[in-house]
Image (cartoon, rainbow, N blue to C red):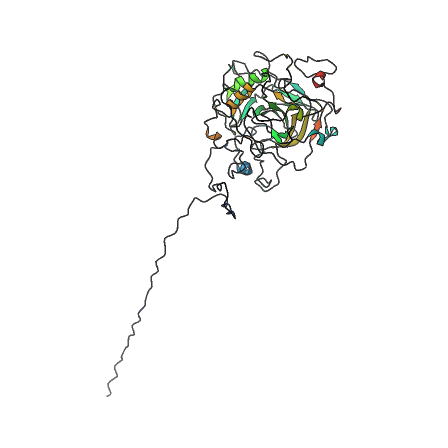
């Protein structure tokens, strides 16, 4: 018997070599993620620092007029949350939303925006007399508005916002106008004064300039989706007499002690009540012009376009005219926001644009009067103190930070829009008071237009 051969098992050891690679720690980003891409580097060093790509946190309703501010300036207004704005509860405009365009003229949804305001006013000789569509003047009604009503039911609320002095009218028995184009009464929603003027025109030296301020009354026409704007440029020239009607407004704004945010809704500020004078005439803001003509109060050596540059056909002198003794407005009366102290002519230049601040609602039909409103240098100084200086309620508000000398929207492109020109000498229409059927102390009469 043959013995079985033993089974020999050979085990081969396999050695596995493992190489461990140590990864570098992740590099932390140098800054927070940004909503917009970082600006492309310039080919050469710039004289001004590149704007910070990180958006600084600001209060709700904050915006400014600085074209270099990519987060809160005009080119970024289309991204603003405009909730709480004064138009939210206005019939016919409740669902309008934000209609401000970006720098390319587009809305946030990518659609092309409507024509915007303010614009440079075309000289009359370039417009022509045949461009007026009106066949009569605006007809005004004062409504129930007494700025001296002591029971808080004066018919309006005085407000000071970071950029404006404003009066918001109560809903009942508002001031109103009858528009020759629309043919029915349209109530005023509010009036406001901006510094400097919104609109710009050619001065006598040929340069494009703004006036010291601008007085605007805003009338929404809900049925037509239009906003009728009556506006007058304000000149605070040295030597001009004090304007009594404008002083009553100043006295009330001087008593406002709360800064009203841009988007706050209606009814905040100070209700109409008995006001005293307050001397804020020592806080003049002497900002220089920027490239777009924005500025604060002018210095004594600064030049402004005279009233004659508005219309050579209706006003022939460049210096303030001696004021005729008028029947001034006072307490215990219905204050007329259309009084001839405030609206010194029935003729104007007109064009279609938008509101000059967010939410930039479209369909605003502007009527910029053909003469200026004169106020005294002291009144202009007081207005500056209230709106932009240390005498106003917004001077230390976060909503005022970064505004600097940029207090109104930059001039918008005309984009081929038509500008109408209504004038007496052009034969467009006569005054309702001709011949001598009205009290010329309160209303405009034909001799106001004689050289």
Residue occupying the far bottom of the picture: 1
Quarter of the image for residue 201 reads: top right
Nearest the eye: 111 or 432: 432
Residue 280 position in % (x across, y down)? 49, 19
The residue drawn where x is 62% and y is 21% is 373
Instruction: Determine whether, in the image, residue 84 is placed left or right of residue 183.
Output: left
Residue 216 position in % (x across, y down)? 60, 25
Depicted 22 relative to depicted 165: above or below: below
Quarter of the image for residue 316 reads: top right
Residue 55 visible somewhere in the drawing: yes
> How many numbered marks does the figure carry?
0
Quadrant location of the C terminus?
top right
Depicted 426 relative to depicted 9: above or below: above
Residue 52 position in % (x across, y down)? 47, 41
Residue occupying the far front of the picture: 301
Nearest the eye: 269 or 125: 125
Depicted 33 relative to depicted 168: above or below: below
Residue 191 position in % (x across, y down)? 58, 23
Nearest the eye: 370 or 21: 370
Residue 267 visible somewhere in the drawing: no
Nearest the eye: 55 or 112: 55
Quadrant location of the N terminus?
bottom left
Quarter of the image for residue 314 reads: top right
């Amino acid at each position: 018997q043959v013995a079985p051969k033993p089974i020999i098992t050979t085990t081969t050891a396999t050695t596995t070599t493992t190489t461990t690679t140590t990864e570098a720690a992740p590099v932390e980003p140098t800054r927070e993620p940004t909503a917009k891409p970082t600006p492309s580097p310039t080919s050469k060093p710039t004289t001004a620092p590149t704007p910070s790509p990180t958006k600084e946190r600001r209060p709700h309703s904050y915006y400014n007029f600085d074209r270099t501010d990519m987060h809160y300036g005009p080119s970024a207004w289309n991204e603003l949350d405009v909730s709480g704005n004064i138009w939210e509860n206005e019939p016919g405009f409740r669902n309008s939303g934000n209609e401000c365009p970006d720098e390319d003229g587009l809305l946030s949804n990518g659609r092309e925006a409507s024509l915007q305001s303010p614009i440079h006013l075309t000289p009359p000789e370039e417009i022509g007399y045949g461009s007026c569509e009106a066949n009569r003047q605006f007809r005004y009604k004062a409504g129930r508005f007494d700025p001296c009503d002591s029971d808080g039911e004066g018919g309006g609320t005085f407000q000071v916002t970071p950029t404006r002095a404003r009066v918001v009218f109560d809903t009942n028995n508002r001031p109103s106008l009858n528009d020759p184009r629309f043919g029915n009464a349209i109530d005023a929603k509010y009036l406001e004064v901006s510094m400097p003027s919104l609109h710009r025109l050619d001065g006598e030296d040929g340069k494009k300039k703004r006036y010291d301020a601008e007085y605007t009354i805003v009338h929404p026409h809900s049925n037509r989706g239009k906003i009728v704007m009556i506006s007058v440029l304000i000149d605070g020239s040295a030597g001009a007499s004090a304007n009594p009607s404008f002083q009553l407004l100043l006295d009330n704004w001087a008593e406002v002690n709360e800064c009203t945010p841009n988007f706050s809704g209606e009814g905040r500020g100070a209700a109409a009540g008995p006001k005293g004078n307050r001397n804020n005439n020592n806080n003049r803001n002497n900002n220089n012009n920027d490239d777009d003509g924005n500025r604060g109060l002018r210095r004594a050596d600064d030049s402004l376009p005279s009233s004659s540059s508005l219309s050579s056909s209706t006003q022939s002198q460049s210096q303030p005219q001696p004021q005729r003794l008028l029947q001034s407005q006072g307490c215990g009366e219905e204050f007329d926001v259309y009084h001839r102290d405030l609206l010194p002519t029935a003729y104007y230049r007109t064009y279609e644009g938008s509101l000059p601040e967010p939410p930039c609602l479209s369909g605003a039909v502007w009527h910029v009067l053909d003469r200026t409103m004169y106020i005294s240098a002291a009144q202009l100084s007081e207005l500056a103190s209230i709106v932009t200086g240390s005498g106003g309620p917004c001077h230390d508000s976060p909503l005022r930070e970064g505004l600097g000398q940029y207090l109104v929207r930059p001039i918008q492109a005309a984009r081929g829009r038509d500008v109408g020109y209504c004038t007496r000498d052009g034969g467009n229409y006569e005054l309702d008071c001709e011949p001598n059927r009205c009290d010329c102390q309160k209303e405009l009469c034909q001799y106001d237009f004689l050289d």
